[in-house]
Image (cartoon, rainbow, N blue to C red):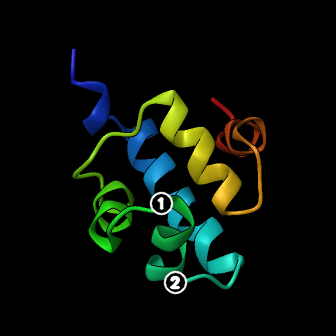
Amino acid sequence: MEKSIYSADYRRLCALLHTLRTEAGLTQVQVAAKLNVPQSFVSKYESGQRRLDVIELGRVAHALGTTTQAILDRLNI
């Protein structure tokens, strides 16, 4: 069984987070500022180099102006 961070579903989540950010008209720097983290944090979770836990996903969703549930609904998992 493959590790979930490398699964197709996880790659779709990373791509969706990137899409949501661009749809919101935000840069990685702006999202990082909202999260009080370095820009590299945003870059790494969008590229799949860093795995988000549930709490972090909730914070990212809030920074993007959405909810964790809306993200999961859009993923259709």
Does 52 sit above or below residue 15?
Answer: above
Displayed quadrant of residue 65: bottom right
Q: Which residue is mark 2?
A: 27
**28 vs 33, nearest the viewer:** 33
Reply above or below: 62 against 28: above
Residue at x-position 32% and y-position 68%: 38
Q: Tell me how far mark 1 sits from mark 2, CA to CA.
A: 15 Å
Task: Identify the image quadrant of the C terminus.
Answer: top right
User: What's the amino acid at mark 2?
Assistant: Thr
Q: Position of residue 49 (x, y in %)?
A: 22, 52
What amino acid type should be assigned to the residue bearing mark 1? Ala
Horizontal relation, residue 25 to residue 50: left or right? right
Q: Nearer the viewer, residue 75 or 20?
A: 20
Residue 64's place in the image compared with 75, above or below, is: below
Q: Describe residue 53's horizontal placement relative to residue 6 as left or right.
A: right
Residue 28 x/y as whole percent: 45, 77
In this view, the mark in front (1 or 2): 2
In the rendered image, the vertical position of residue 31 relative to residue 10, given as above or below: below
- Element under disc 2: loop
Q: Residues within 10 Å of mark 1 (few under 14, many from 20)?
A: some
The residue at 29%/35% (across/down) is 5
Is 21 left or right of 71, judged from the image as shown?
A: left
Helix, strand or loop at label 1? It is helix
Mark linked to residue 31: none
Q: Which residue lies most toward the front here?
A: 36
Say few, some or many: other residues with alpha carbon within 10 Å of mark 2 (under 14 / 14 to 19 / 20 or more).
Answer: some
Of the residues under marks 1 and 2, which one precedes in the sequence? 1
Would you name the residue on which mark 1 appears?
15
Q: Quadrant of the N terminus?
A: top left
Which residue sits at x=76%, y=45%?
67
